[in-house]
Structure formats: structure tokens, C-alpha cells
Image: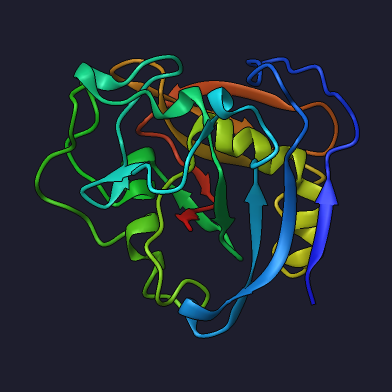
């Protein structure tokens, strides 16, 4: 059985703003037949204006990791993946905990620069290795963009209903990495502590959690 949860309130954000139409998004619990009939939380934005969503087939990843970008532009000519929301994406059932920013993406060579690409050498950590876990087996996973992570916060309650053993919201501070870079040495995080949403940047070398996403 599928369940849909719709956004019904307009929320004022302390960090950044959504594309102009904030409605037209919902979360669905459904079975993905290509993933051995696993049930996942899927966030859809197909009700947004076309200018606010990435259509199916737009590649959000390169080399197994989210395309390198900042809040409002891509790194060194990359597509600005944070400008829009994918028409749909899967939220992972569990966290990867206590990893630095590069470990979260399973990448190397991303600290101290804003290059277009990470180093050719990869690491078997974070979202890159999540596809080898029981929960993520059979799919490719990546670190969410800042906007994707914002949507995940908006749907934090239904995410906790769909994944009752691994809710994202927490009574105390619980920081999640975004793939979005602030500058050469810092990247954005979002605190999922109950109450007012709070996003900020911190050193790429510090640790936080990551809730991977999968393009679908």
C-alpha cells in the first residue's frame, strides 16, 4: 500500500528560500521493484513549476558522487544542481553516522578547493558504500543537496513514520551533511533537532551524519 503526505503549510526558512512555488511536493511510501521489492520513502516535486524542478533523466551525480556545487552555482562550470529539486528521489532508510564531509560522499581530494571534480581515487565509505548495505543494496546513493535536505526536513515526520526505527528528527542536535559547499574548507549541514530548522556551514573535516538519497 502507498501513502502520500502533502505539504500543507508555508514555512518561513531561516537559511535559504525554495523556488517560487513551495507547494506541489509530497512524500510517498512505495515498493521499488528494481530494488528487490524494497519499500522506500520517495519525495516527489512533480507539482512544482517546470522551472523549479529537474526533469527525469537529469544527472545529479558524476563519478558516483553528487556533482560538486555551491548554493547558487556549480563548481568551475558544473551544472548548478542546487538550483532546482529533482522530480523525485528516494530517501535512505537509515543514517550513516559520524563521518566527515568527504567520507560522507566516499570521495577524496575535496578539502581545500572548489574544483569541478573530486580526486580520481574514491573511498569505500558513506553514500558510495551504502549500496552494499542491507538497507541500500541494489541502488546507487549520494549525499543530498542543500535543497533536497531541506525537503527532507519538511517531511521529517512522515520520514519517521515510514522508517520508524530510523527517524531523522531528534530531541537534541542531530546534524546532517549536504553535498553543497560553502567555500574551499566548509560545507553546509542541517540540524534536525525538533523545533525551528537551522542550517549552517562547518569544516569539511568535522563529523556529522548523512542520510543518503538515490535518484529514481
Name, please, the residue furthest toward the front: 50
**Which image quarter: residue 158?**
bottom right
Say which residue appears at 59% left-offset and 38% top-offset. 149
- For the N terminus, the image quarter is bottom right
Name, please, the residue furthest toward the right: 8
Q: Position of residue 127 (x, y in %)?
A: 39, 56
Left-right relation of 176 to 26: left
User: Between residues 31 and 210, which one lies in front from this camera angle?
Assistant: 31
Left-right relation of 136 to 17: left
User: Between residues 57 and 39, which one lies in front from this camera angle?
Assistant: 57
Say which residue appears at 39% left-offset and 20% top-offset. 70
* Model colouring: rainbow
Q: Position of residue 14 (x, y in %)?
A: 72, 15
Say which residue appears at 61% left-offset and 65% top-offset. 93
Question: Is residue 134 among what the camera can see?
Answer: no
Q: Position of residue 178 (x, y in %)?
A: 48, 35
Amino acid at each position: 500500500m502507498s501513502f502520500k503526505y502533502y505539504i500543507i503549510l508555508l514555512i518561513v526558512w531561516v537559511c535559504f528560500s525554495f523556488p517560487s512555488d513551495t507547494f506541489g511536493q509530497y512524500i510517498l511510501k512505495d515498493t521499488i521493484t528494481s530494488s528487490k521489492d524494497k519499500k522506500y520513502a520517495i519525495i516527489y516535486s512533480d507539482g512544482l513549476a517546470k522551472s523549479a524542478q529537474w526533469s527525469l533523466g537529469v544527472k545529479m551525480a558524476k563519478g558516483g558522487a553528487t556533482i560538486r556545487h555551491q548554493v547558487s552555482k556549480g563548481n568551475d562550470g558544473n551544472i548548478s544542481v542546487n538550483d532546482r529539486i529533482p522530480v523525485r528521489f528516494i530517501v535512505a532508510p537509515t543514517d550513516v553516522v559520524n563521518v566527515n564531509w568527504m567520507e560522507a560522499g566516499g570521495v577524496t581530494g575535496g578539502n581545500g578547493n572548489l574544483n569541478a571534480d573530486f580526486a580520481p581515487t574514491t573511498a569505500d565509505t558513506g553514500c558510495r558504500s551504502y549500496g552494499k548495505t542491507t538497507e541500500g543494496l541494489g541502488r546507487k546513493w549520494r549525499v543530498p543537496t542543500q535543497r533536497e535536505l531541506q525537503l527532507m526536513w519538511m517531511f521529517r515526520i512522515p520520514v519517521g513514520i515510514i522508517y520508524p526505527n530510523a527517524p531523522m528528527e531528534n530531541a537534541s542536535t542531530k546534524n546532517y551533511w549536504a553535498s553543497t559547499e560553502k567555500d574551499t574548507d566548509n560545507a553546509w549541514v542541517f540540524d534536525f533537532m525538533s523545533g525551528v530548522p537551522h542550517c549552517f556551514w562547518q569544516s569539511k573535516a568535522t563529523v556529522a551524519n548523512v542520510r543518503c538519497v538515490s535518484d529514481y
